[in-house]
Amino acid sequence: MAHTDTPIASGASNRPQTGAEYLASLQDNREIYIYGERIADITKHPAYRNSAASISRLFDSIQDPDDPAASPTDTGNGGHTHAFFKVPRTRDDLVASKVAIQHWQRQSYGWMGRTPDYKASLITMLGADPDFFGEYAPNARYWYRRVQEELLHVGHAIVHPPVDRARGMEDAKDVFVHVDEETDSGLIVSGAKVVATGAALTQYTYVSHIGPKASKEFALIFMAPLHAPGVKLYSRHSYEFAAAAGSSPFDYPLSSRFDENDAILVFDRALIPWENVLAYDPETVFEFNAGDYSWGPRAAFQASTRLEAKLDFIIGLVSKALDVTGAGGFRGVQAQLGELLAFKDLVSGMRDGMIEGATEGFGGSLLPNTRYALSYAAAAPGYYSRMRQIIETIIASGLIYLNSHSSDFQVPEIRKDLDRFLRGSNGLTALDRSKVMKALWDATGSEFGARHELYELNYWGQPEKTYLDILGLHQADGGLAASRAYAEEFMASYDLDGFTDPALHNPGAFSAIPRANR
Ligand SMILES: Cc1cc2nc3c(=O)[nH]c(=O)nc-3n(C[C@H](O)[C@H](O)[C@H](O)COP(=O)(O)OP(=O)(O)OC[C@H]3O[C@@H](n4cnc5c(N)ncnc54)[C@H](O)[C@@H]3O)c2cc1C
């Protein structure tokens, strides 16, 4: 299986791609549709251009081997990469990964869930034990090396579309990704994936079946370049486009630059060359996603570090918004701001617990602690919704007591009234109010903000399933049995006759209950 793709970082063989090289690679005639037409160049289209530019800046911030995210490669090319793109072997490696993820996430203030480091959670694991992939082991080695050396932007599409959920997969074969045909050059694949967040901005998509063991035609894992014939993306409505067409960056500062379009990914008899196939049998696919080979804890490690940045940003805005409304001095309001801070600290603490309690993973890698990873993934969505509720409670009408557009401030007769009636508290001006509140509205109340709650709730799978996984983990590793034994130890210290522990005092004659009833 010979790999024939041209490296993206064509300028040098031992450094990650630059922002300009990344943007140029997106101009590859990929088939993306929005608003009734095919996009000619997503780096210039108003639905995508600022989000693409936001991703490109990440690559520029890691060109120097001394940049905070940078770390020497382990592939032998003598270059450097992002620390999270290497198989971790020690706790120091995980700490370096944390610092590298933080460095990238703070550049998008935590609002881009699908920056390249998200998929590094998984792709890196291809390098931990490539032989796991059997006949496709050379492919696993190849993709590990390439993604690490060039810092490729890979998206993922694993969940099947929400169709015929209560029926067998066979019933939705017209919709779900499956193999149509095996040929000498590869697999011919058709079908859709639920959504591939940010896929239009990626260079490759990692596609896998996930869930119960599937029959062979569904049981595959592969990499697909976005420009491959037969690969199509149908974009959802673009918040970036809406902000450009009907508003302004001042009014929608997040929608305008960090919108990761959740597009529907379709394969229409696309040829997946054998060198892009990583698995094609029910056992391997199931094991890689669900067994000891699971990459999930790494994804939770990255996602919690991303959420940490997002919460830091939102809390900063909320605190400033309270200065605007003047409600920040009330005790109840202060307690709720404290609750938001506790949420942020919980997320950081769970992530650090993932490092502290890391365990040996496959191929001698160090896996972030699975219990903390799952607990983070299950609990964070509920806290996130609670956060939105708190903001709507303590900022209240402040979120909506706003003028329509930045241009209002440029019209003197409107400005006069805005300056008077929309002034802030504590000496803050109408412009101060507008800038803070519009950013907070975009974060929590706009279509972009509401989609983020949906994202936090679902990107991992719904919490009910994750809580069941946590239960299964504690049943399997003896954790639940230990809790039961602990409770039983306590219950053994008393019986119908009172305390069995001689150090404790039974009521005896002191009891007012009649002797027969004691
Ligand atoms: C904003 C956003 C971005 C996303 N990005 C991506 C992406 O980039 N790549 C990707 O692969 N996926 C992505 N997803 C999909 C995401 O992983 C799923 O939404 C999530 O796993 C939940 O699955 P579902 O949406 O199919 O819901 P379902 O599984 O259909 O669940 C809907 C409801 O039905 C219940 N239910 C479903 N099946 C059963 C059953 N067998 N028994 C009992 N109850 C059942 C569930 O408990 C739930 O209440 C994204 C989702 C969102 C919302």
Image (tube, helix red, strand yellow):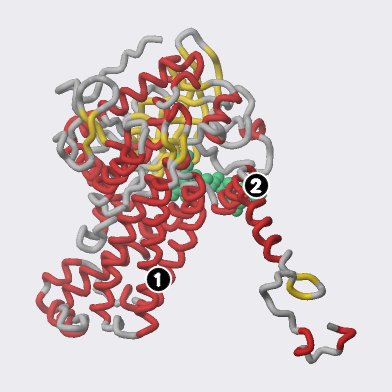
- The residue wearing badge 1 is 339
Q: Nearer the viewer, residue 72 or 238?
A: 72
Q: Position of residue 18 (x, y in %)?
A: 18, 33
**Residue at (54% x, 21% y) in the render:** 280
- Residue 27 lies, with reference to residue 274, above or below; the image says below
Res. 148 in view? yes
Res. 116 in view? no
Closer to the camera: disc 2 or disc 1? 2
**Residue at (61% x, 30% y) in the render:** 173
The single residue placed furthest to the bottom in the displayed view is: 512
Q: Is residue 491 left or right of residue 134?
A: right
* Three-letter residue code for mark 2: Gln
Q: Position of residue 362 (x, y in %)?
A: 48, 30
Q: Give residue 196's quadrant in the image.
A: top left
**Residue at (36% x, 36% y) in the render:** 90
Tell me the quarter of the image containing the N terminus.
top left
**Label 2–label 1 contact, CB within 8 A:** no
Q: Is residue 237 left or right of residue 436?
A: right
Tell me the quarter of the image containing the C terminus.
bottom right
Q: Is residue 253 left or right of residue 35?
A: left
Asked whether mark 2 lies closer than 8 Å to ligand 1, one says no
* Three-letter residue code for mark 1: Glu
- The residue wearing badge 2 is 475
Q: Position of residue 130 (x, y in %)?
A: 44, 21
Q: Position of residue 42 (x, y in %)?
A: 27, 37
| SS assignment at label 2 | helix
- Residue 131 lies, with reference to residue 31, above or below; the image says above
Earlier-in-chain disc, 2 versus 1: 1
Q: Marks 2/1: CA distance? A: 32 Å
Q: Is residue 266 left or right of residue 27?
A: right
Asked whether mark 1 lies closer than 8 Å to ligand 1, one says no
